[in-house]
Amino acid sequence: MSSRSVVRVAILVAIALPSAGCGDEGARVRREIEEALAAIRTYSHSQKDRFEERFDSSLDRLEIEIDRLEAKAAAGTADARRRLEPRIAELEREAADVRDRMRAAIQAGVDSWNSQRDESCRRLEALEEEVERCRREHGLGG
């Protein structure tokens, strides 16, 4: 399946599942990001444009999830806001760092492409896990 087909399927799934009343938003986002990561890990140096597109899309989704967590925290009690604000700020800093590392991977030459690409993917995956952990620990479901 081409990367465009995968993106189209992901968009259709993203539209269809919520409208059908199916499942947990957080689980759906996690699954989509895991699928994207599996695909972008295989991109060669000559496929950097596709890597960048998929990576940006996945990171954008995580940034939206961070914004949702921030909105839920803002709507919560003063104690919840006090506990969550530093955690959300850290997630935002990590997202910016992941984006910077991805940009470095894009600029990397052929010799360092694989290690830069893989490190960018590891950081994105770690950020996704941290967003999920924050959601669970603070009862902020999908």
Image (cartoon, rainbow, N blue to C red):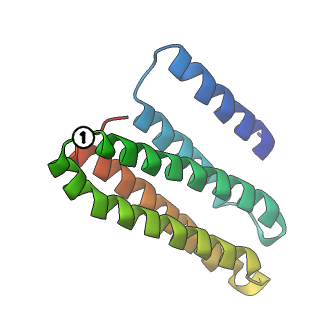
Give the number of marks.
Answer: 1
- Describe residue 32's horizontal placement relative to residue 27 as left or right: right
Quarter of the rendering containing residue 83: bottom left
Quarter of the rendering containing residue 40: bottom right
For residue 85, above or below residue 141: below
Where's residue 68, x and y in %? Answer: 43, 43
Which amino acid, by three-letter code, is at mark 1? Gly
- Describe residue 71's horizontal placement relative to residue 37 as left or right: left
Looking at this view, name the residue that lies furthest to the front.
78
> What residue is at 42 percent from the left and 23 percent from the top?
23
Looking at this view, name the residue that lies furthest to the right.
46
Q: In the rendered image, is residue 118 in sight? A: no
> What residue is at 37 percent from the left and 64 percent from the top?
89
- Describe residue 24's horizontal placement relative to residue 40 as left or right: left
Q: In the rendered image, is residue 107 in sight? A: yes
- According to the picture, the residue beneath numbered tag 1 turns out to be 76
Where's residue 108, x and y in %? Answer: 73, 82
Q: Which image quarter is the N terminus in?
A: top right
Helix or strand or loop: what does disc 1 sit on?
loop
For residue 54, above or below residue 4: below
Where's residue 25, x and y in %? Answer: 44, 32
For residue 27, above or below residue 100: above
> What residue is at 29 percent from the left and 58 percent from the top?
85
94 and 113: which one is in front? 94
Q: Which image quarter is the C terminus in?
A: top left
> What residue is at 33 percent from the left and 40 percent from the top?
72
- Describe residue 36's horizontal placement relative to residue 46 as left or right: left
Where's residue 74, x and y in %? Answer: 32, 45
